[in-house]
Image (spheres, rainbow, N blue to C red):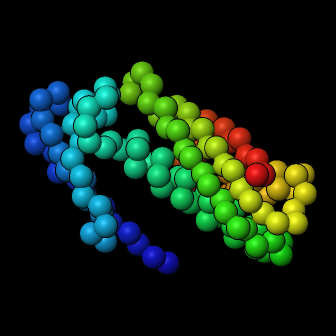
Amino acid sequence: MTMRTSSAVWQGTLKEGSGTMKLASGTYEGPFTFASRFESGKGTNPEELIGAAHAGCYAMFLSALLSNEGFVPKKIATTATVHLTEGPTISLIELTCEAEIPGISAQAFQTQALAAKVGCPVSKLLAGAEIRLEAKLV
């Protein structure tokens, strides 16, 4: 199986400090701060990166499930909204998916969409949070 590595460096106190997150592939390196995580400051945050990972994993897994059933997805667009609440705790992730899948019925699509929500590796990892799905054909 594959292994992927990411890293982070933080310097200073929680509120006044700052850090950098980096992907080993070199495709992303960016800053994060207290303000970018808990307010609306410039930079990224762990929840944003988790959301990107979840949206990407879900779309790929749904594509695999559909392909296994003989459907060729034209497009699967997924957004993950990660809610950071008191604690702080990631309590809710809302997946929104719009897909263009020629030849599939709405019912068959919903069956595969729900299976992908449960079965994608990132959903399995994040199972401690509530994961909601809104999936529709376009």
Q: Residue furthest left?
A: 12
Could you say which quadrant of the image residue 99 lies in? bottom right
Q: Residue at x 71, y 41 (%)?
A: 134
Left or right of residue 54: residue 64: right
Residue 124 appears in the rendering: no
Q: Residue at x 88, y 66 (%)?
A: 103
Q: Residue furthest top?
A: 86
Q: Tell me residue 21's x, y (percent).
A: 25, 53
Residue 90 appears in the rendering: yes
Q: Tell me residue 6's x, y (percent).
A: 30, 61
Left or right of residue 6: residue 75: right
Compared with residue 99, is residue 102 higher up or lower down, i.e. above or below? below
Compared with residue 43, is residue 23 higher up or lower down, i.e. above or below? below
Q: Tell me residue 75's x, y (percent).
A: 67, 63
Left or right of residue 137: residue 124: left
Could you say which quadrant of the image residue 36 lies in? top left
Q: Tell me residue 41's x, y (percent).
A: 26, 32
